[in-house]
Image (tube, rainbow, N blue to C red):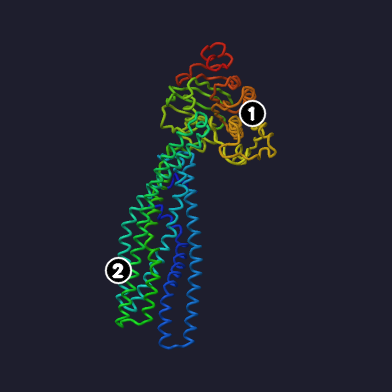
Amino acid sequence: MTTPDTQRPRPGSDILRTALRRNVGAMAWGTVLMGLYQAGETAFPIALGLIVEHTLQHRSPGALGLSIAALAVIITTVSLSWRFGMRVLQKANTTEAHRWRVRVAACGLQPVARDVDLKSGEVLTIATEDADQTADIIEVVPLLISSLVAVLVAAVALGVADIRLGLLVIVGTVGILSILSVMSRRIGSSTREQQARVARAGAKVADLITGLRPLHGFGGNHAAFLSYRKVSTDAKHQAVTVAKVNGVYAGTALALNAVLAAAVTLTAGRLAFDGQITIGELVMAVGLAQFIMEPLKLFSEMPKYVMMARASAERMALVLTAPPVTNPGPERPAPGAGLDIDCVRYGALRELKFQVTAGEFVAIAAYQPRAAADLASILAVNTPPQAYEGVVRIGGREIADLSIEAVRAYMLVNPYDGEIFAGTLRTNIDPSGTSRTVSEAVEASMLTDVVALHRAGLDHAVRDRGANLSGGQRQRLSLARALAADSDILVLHDPTTAVDAVTEQLVARNIAELRRGRTTVVLTSSPALLDAADRVLVLDDGAVVAEDTHRNLLATDEGYCLAVAR
């Protein structure tokens, strides 16, 4: 399967062409069926005109019965063709929207982030609303063609009665579309701006939900609400502008269509009054003039929907064409090796250099929290190798030469603020359902009390972001997930900051026992974890300034003692 990273960049117009090409079969069937529907609708006033004509001339009950049967066939054709035509088109539309939603989501979930200036809330809007509006092109084209069929059939039928009526319909239709195509450009630009503002409002909501607990903590709720209201108000004003533009467009289209229908009716009436067309042809012309407003309305709305689909496709292209932040190599780490940081300079890190041999448990006490965060970011490959100086080796291979999938399979970096997802305790600990160490991870993280509290045990429901769990429970659940992964190298960043001292002591001992023989690095200031480690590296001003066991450092290094003793 080709991943989004290996596909050629696709601008908005290319996305639309791809959508159309993938649905040629469904669109062809839909066009045929909707063409039949429009042709049947057009045939109805034509049939009425013929019935009147023949009735006046022959006054035959048999001809009347035949005409009624013909009308029944037309009505049946109209009903069935509409039903099955819209079913085909809407199925194709829904399927295509699903494909683009999955494609955008796949780009957002790639191991390598994309260099795109969009927040997660904006990407969510693109993956939902914009994907749906882009897929609307699947319905727009067949409806456009079928409406054109109806207009052409009406023009031909009127042209048979009198060439001037047919030319009036054709010239009027061309004039209407020319005017509306100019207006549709304004709709496209206004819609793009509206979508951008709605996306920004969505991103603001996502940010606020993420920081909801801290906001409650320092009383920032009101300021956050005002911030969101401003962004949402901007989106509302732009939505009103788009509604006004759409209203002007729809009103203009309706007025022009009505003028054309009235022109056809009045022209046919004058021709009938002068005896140039028959009464039956007059009835047909009046009926077609009334009917033609519907396909003309549909036909005239198509440029608007095309511009909206194109605007959404261009927003999707912002995600799909964005280059990856880094281009990972093809190699994999050699098994049974450790971790090597060689003269790394980045952020708060200054010439950082240390080694962790295979199977070793190393704790890193960083006096500056920023240094620990920068190191975790580098090891998690959230910071690309080209963004920092120095070399990071995993399993004897430079991280720049490794595929991201290989890095993640070999080394797991568990952040201090690991996300909790809606589901159950079990699905949060073992999302893939393949771990063989779930029970050991639960015990090691001291999550057993949470499991025991609920009758469902590990199948206890967890709300989005762990809203029904305490801070300590969420942290232990995140730790259990990291331990259950059983990776060759495990990096933990402050895994026990939200638990009490007794639990922290037990967790530290359990981690050391469970990870015995596996490489483990813990970024922490916890005395319990520092004491459980084989050795401790002390980071000050971005570099290693001391290295020994926790107890030896307590006895010999006063600065270390002041920094970590509780």
Give the image location of residue 484, x and y in percent: 61, 34
| Displayed quadrant of residue 498 | top right
Q: Name the residue tied to disc 2.
A: 171
- In this view, the residue in front, 144 or 374, is 144
Q: Of helix, strand and loop, which one carries label 1?
A: helix
Give the image location of residue 123, x and y in percent: 45, 43
Q: Of helix, strand and loop, which one carries label 2?
A: helix
Residue at 50% from the left image edge and 77% from the top image edge: 72
- In this view, the residue in front, 322 or 163, is 163
Disc 2 to disc 1, C-alpha distance: 82 Å
Say if 453 sits above or below 370 in the image: below
Q: Does residue 130 appear in the picture of this structure?
A: yes
Residue at 48% from the left image edge and 17% from the top image edge: 545
Task: Give the position of the C terminus as an image quadrant.
Answer: top right
| Displayed quadrant of residue 268 | bottom left
- In this view, the residue in front, 379 or 360, is 379
Amino acid bearing label 1: Leu
Q: Name the residue tied to disc 1.
A: 514
